[in-house]
Image (cartoon, rainbow, N blue to C red):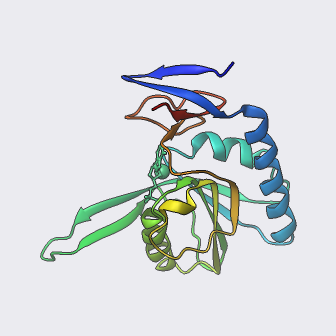
Amino acid sequence: MSKIIQVKDKKFAVSIPEEKIQAEVKRVAAAINRDYAGQEPVFLAVLNGSFVFAADLMREIDIPCEISFVRLASYQGMGTTGEIREIMGLNVDVTGRPVIIVEDIVDTGLTMAHMLDTLKKHNPSSIDICTLLLKPGKLQVSLDVRYCCMEIPNDFIVGYGLDYDGYGRNTKDIYTLCD
Ligand code: IMP
Ligand code: MG
C-alpha cells in the first residue's frame, strides 16, 4: 500500500522512504569524512531546499568543519544588460579553504553551474558539489558532482526539504507526483 499525500492541488506518492534517504546520507557523509580528513571544509548549504538534508548530513560529519546557509540571488546590474549573480549569506571567509556545496537537487544543473562561477570569485582552494538528488536525464551542462546520495528519474518530487510551490517540505519521505 503506497502512501499518498496531497500538496496544494496535487497528489504525490512515496517514492523514497525515510530509511533509504538516511542510509544514503550516511554513506555520502562517510565518504566526505574520509576524503576531507585533515582538512577543515566549509559547507555551503543552498537555501531553501537543502535545509533538511544539510541538517542530517552535518550530524554525520565528524571532522572539524563550518557551515553557512546561502542563497543565490540574481539581479540586473546598473548600466549593464547582463544578469549579475551574488551569493547571499556567505558570512564565512572561504579564501584558500575547501568548500563543499550542499544542494537538494541538481535538475538542469544551471543553478550549480552559476554557483560554481560565482563562488570561484571568492578564491576557495577547492569546490565539491554534494547533492541529495540528481536527475541525470535533465542535466543540460557538464557538471562534476562528486557526492550524490541518489539519482532519480525526471519526475517532479517533494518532501524532505523540497517543495511544490512552497509547500510539502515538511516530510520525512520523498514523494513523486502522481499522474
Ligand atoms: P536546476 O538549476 O535546474 O538544476 O534546478 C535546481 C533547483 O530546482 C533545485 O535546487 C530545486 O529548488 C528545484 N527543483 C528541481 N527539480 C525539482 C523537483 O523535482 N522538485 C522540487 N524542486 C525541484
Ligand atoms: Mg534549490
Q: Residue furthest left?
A: 79
Tell me where residue 2 sits by quadrant: top right
For the N terminus, the quadrant is: top right
Query: Residue 152: x, y in percent?
Result: 61, 51
6 left or right, relative to 128:
left
Query: Residue 64: x, y in percent?
Result: 80, 60
For the C terminus, the quadrant is: top left
Q: Residue furthest front?
A: 179
Q: Residue at x 58, y 42 (%)?
A: 51
Q: Residue at x 35, y 58 (%)?
A: 73
114 left or right, relative to 52:
left
Q: How many marks?
A: 0
Q: Nearer the viewer, residue 122 or 143?
A: 143
35 left or right, relative to 21:
right
Name above or below for residue 121 compared with residue 135: below
Q: Residue at x 71, y 33 (%)?
A: 17
Q: Nearer the viewer, residue 133 or 154?
A: 154
Q: Nearer the viewer, residue 6 or 77?
A: 6
Name above or below for residue 19 compared with residue 44: above
